[in-house]
Amino acid sequence: MADVEVTYDKEADAAYVYFTEPRERRSVSHMYPCDPVGVGGMINLDFDEGGQLVGVEVLSASSKLPRYLLDAAVRIDVEDQ
């Protein structure tokens, strides 16, 4: 099973789960928004030109994803010191 990369912006409370290798990142050509009833926030599915799922954006991530996943994610809201 391939590993996935997760990035997290704590200030925006948004996470992104990549299903592609960093060196193989593909452009998103279509985004399918999901607004689950009864669950606050949005989940966006990103697809490439060939219809392959390349990633998932999770808004209000702290209420939808396990804490251990967010703690292990690459933080994109923190500038390098």
Image (spheres, helix red, strand yellow):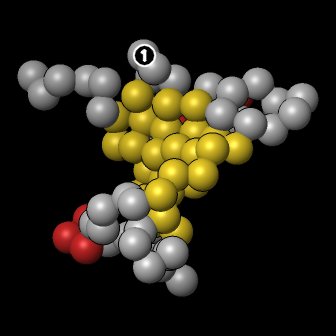
Q: Is residue 66 something one can see in this rendering? A: no
Which quadrant of the figure contains the N terminus? bottom right
Residue on which the image places disc 1 = 11
Rendered position, 26 above or below 74: below
Most extreme residue toward the right is 38
Q: Residues within 10 Å of mark 1 (few under 14, many from 20)?
A: few
Rendered position, 20 above or below 10: below
Query: Relative to the observer, which residue lies in front, 29 or 22?
Result: 29
Q: Position of residue 24 (x, y in %)?
A: 25, 73
Query: Relative to the observer, which residue lies in front, 33 or 55?
Result: 33
Q: Is residue 20 left or right of residue 65?
A: left
Callout count: 1
Secondary structure, mark 1, is loop
Q: Is residue 78 something one can see in this rendering? A: yes
- Disc 1 marks a residue whose amino acid type is Glu
Residue at 10% across, 22% down: 81
Residue at 45% across, 20% down: 12
Q: Is residue 58 left or right of residue 35?
A: left
Most extreme residue toward the top is 11
Q: Position of residue 63 (x, y in %)?
A: 70, 28
Query: Relative to the observer, which residue lies in front, 32 or 66?
Result: 32
**In which image quadrant can residue 79 be found?**
top left
Q: Position of residue 48 (x, y in %)?
A: 41, 68
Most extreme residue toward the bottom is 1
Q: Position of residue 71 (x, y in %)?
A: 49, 37
Residue at 74% across, 36% down: 35
Q: Is residue 33 left or right of residue 49?
A: right
Residue at 44% across, 50% down: 6
